[in-house]
Every structure is written in C-alpha cells, then in structure tokens.
Amino acid sequence: MRKVYFNGEFVDESEARISIYDSAMMFGDTVFEMTRSFQKEQFKLREHLERLYASARYLHIDLESVLTIREMEQAVYKTIEINEPYFEKDDEHRIMIDITRGLLSIYQDVVGTYAGLNVIIADFPLRWTVDGMGKLFDTGINAVIPSQRAIPASLIDPKVKNRSRVHYLMANIEVSNYEGDNNWALLLDTDNFIAEGTGDNFFIVKDGKLYTPEPRNILRGISRGYIMQLCQTQGIECIERNLDVYDVVNADEAFMSGTPFCMLPVTSINGQKIGNGKMGDMTQRLIDLWGKNVGVDIIGQIKEWNRNSSKGRSNAPSPYSFKAKG
C-alpha cells in the first residue's frame, strides 16, 4: 500500500487524515503544491517548493520552523523511494504537498489530538490526473467564459497557491451546463481581461508571437514559466499583456499549460473556432521540444495511459471540469 509522509512519519494512504477542527476544514487554510516526474525524475521540484514556502510566508504559516526547504526536498524524495515499489514501470510520480495551519485555538487541548501545523506529502500515479485527456491533443479544448470571475489580487493574491478554490469549482459547474464536449472554463478578471483556467494558464499565438496574460491576477504557473524559457531558446517572442476575448477569437492558435499535461491545445472559445480549429504549429513545436528535453513523448505517454485505463466513468468533479449527475 502506498505511504504518505505525515508530520515526519509514513502512514498508509488510507490513514492520512487531519482533524475536522483543523483550520484547513474551517477556512480552506492550506497552501499546497503538486509536481510530476518525467522518467521517474521530478521536474522543477525546487521551483515548486520555493513557491510553496513563499505561499506559506504570505499566509503567516511558519513552515520553515518545522522543515527547511532542503529537508522538505529530502522528504519528497524519501516519499518517492518508499512508494516506487507500488508503481508500474511506465508510471510517473505525482507529488501532492499540503500544509495546514492546524487546529483552531478553541479546539486545542480539548479534542485530544495534535494541534500544530501539518505537513503532508502524498505520491500517486500521474495517470490518475490525466485520465481522459489523451483525446484533447486531437480535438482540443473548447474554452468557455463563465460568469464567475477570477479572484483579483486586490482581494487575495492569486500567486499564493491555496486550497480556497470554490470560485474555480463554481466556474466548472457553470461550464458543465454548456452544450458539447471538452468544455473547460477560462476565467476573466474583474476588468474583463483573460486571467486563467481552473488550474491552468493560458496562451495565444498571433503572427508568430506568443502572448499570455500579465501576471497580476493569475497563479504564475511553473509550466507557464518553463514555456517562456523554451521560447527564449527558440527565439520566439513571448509577451505578457492584458488579453481580451476579442484577442482569443482572432488568435492563430491557443493552448493551456499545466503541470500534469504540460500543454493542451485550445481550438475554440465559446464554440467559435480559433485558427483552423486544430493544434497549431507553435503549440506542437513547443510541446515536442519540452518532450525532447525531458526524454518523454508527452502526448504519446498520456494517450497510451488512456488506452490502458481501467478506471470507470465517474460523475465526480475533476480539477478542470465538473460533471453533473444524470
């Protein structure tokens, strides 16, 4: 059975639990990170951890007093080592780190349970996250603009990766009622500019240049940053600026970026075709280069997992979509 790092110990995955009186349950008071591997090697782990510690500092969670970033890195690798025997040969490691503040003060010394900060590191197969996504490399995503807006930095800074994400879920619920398949939410900010998806960043291509929303009202994704690095190596101009729906409708191509799938083409917005309605040349070029750099056929790997998937259909929501019960 897979093991979870839980406050310095390794427990069975099914036994990794926090108290119902934890601040995480009461306020969604949790910072987190999720990573992936390529050929079992963690990708950009240090960058993910640096963002985790920055998020914790912003929320006044004294994570550094419990584990230094170096100790956290070692704990991640130990978690992977312990769980590797439970992974298939072609699996990749999906690491999930959750940091909760602990019990609210009114429950401390009353409920007879650990009161302090919780550090939880889980490791599970990446294929779980990308199940069903293989087809999207061919069909593309239809981006749908919901009425739900992104939370602006003036209210709470979206650079803080936290679990208070009901606005993402509300956007996904609304988009689930849109006709057709492969609908993913694309949120606007409160100024009606494109912000982000519900767990992914957004790019468009126009006249050989790459554009992505300026970072004020978005989570600055690790994958987003890596794509910008790839552009530098290829002499592709990548511009951060305010984008509106008009820009997307008139783009040559578009795509989403995110840790588990790296890049997925967006071939329409609100049902209106973008470019030729297929994965664009620059999207293909960048994901091919990414795959070459990490030694993995990214698209082929996800498609192969999907072909061999034994998971049944579920109406439970995913991080990117919501399925209404029917």
Image: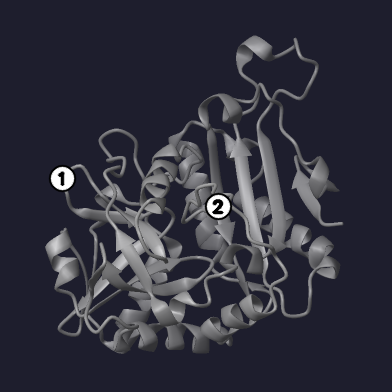
Direction from residue 294 to residue 17 in the image, left or right: right
The spot of residue 188 in percent (x, y) is 24, 50
Q: Is residue 69 shown to the viewer in this render?
A: yes
Q: Residue at x 64, y 25 (%)?
A: 22
Check residue 191 in the rendering and tell me which mark sits there, or answer none: 1
Pick the residue in front: 63 or 243. 243
Q: Is residue 9 shown to the viewer in this render?
A: no
The spot of residue 275 in percent (x, y) is 21, 81
User: Of the residues shown, which amino acid type is indicated by label 2?
Assistant: Glu
CB atoms of marks 2 and 1 within 8 Å:
no
Q: Residue at x 51, y 27 (%)?
A: 27
Viewer-nearest of labels 2 and 1?
1
Q: Residues within 10 Å of mark 2 (few under 14, many from 20)?
A: many
| Quadrant containing the N terminus in the rendered view | bottom right
Q: Earlier in the sequence, mark 2 or mark 1?
A: 2
Give the quadrant of residue 296. Answer: bottom right
Q: Is residue 247 above or below residue 71?
A: below
Give the quadrant of residue 318. Answer: bottom right
Q: Residue at x 60, y 28 (%)?
A: 25
SS at mark 2 in the image: strand
Check residue 33 in the rendering and tell me which mark sits there, or answer none: 2
Q: Is residue 308 above or below residue 101?
A: below
SS at mark 1 in the image: loop
Q: Residue at x 55, y 61 (%)?
A: 46
User: Of the residues shown, which amino acid type is indicated by label 1?
Assistant: Asp
Q: How many marks?
A: 2
Give the quadrant of residue 169. Answer: top left
Q: Residue placed farthest to the front in the image?
A: 326
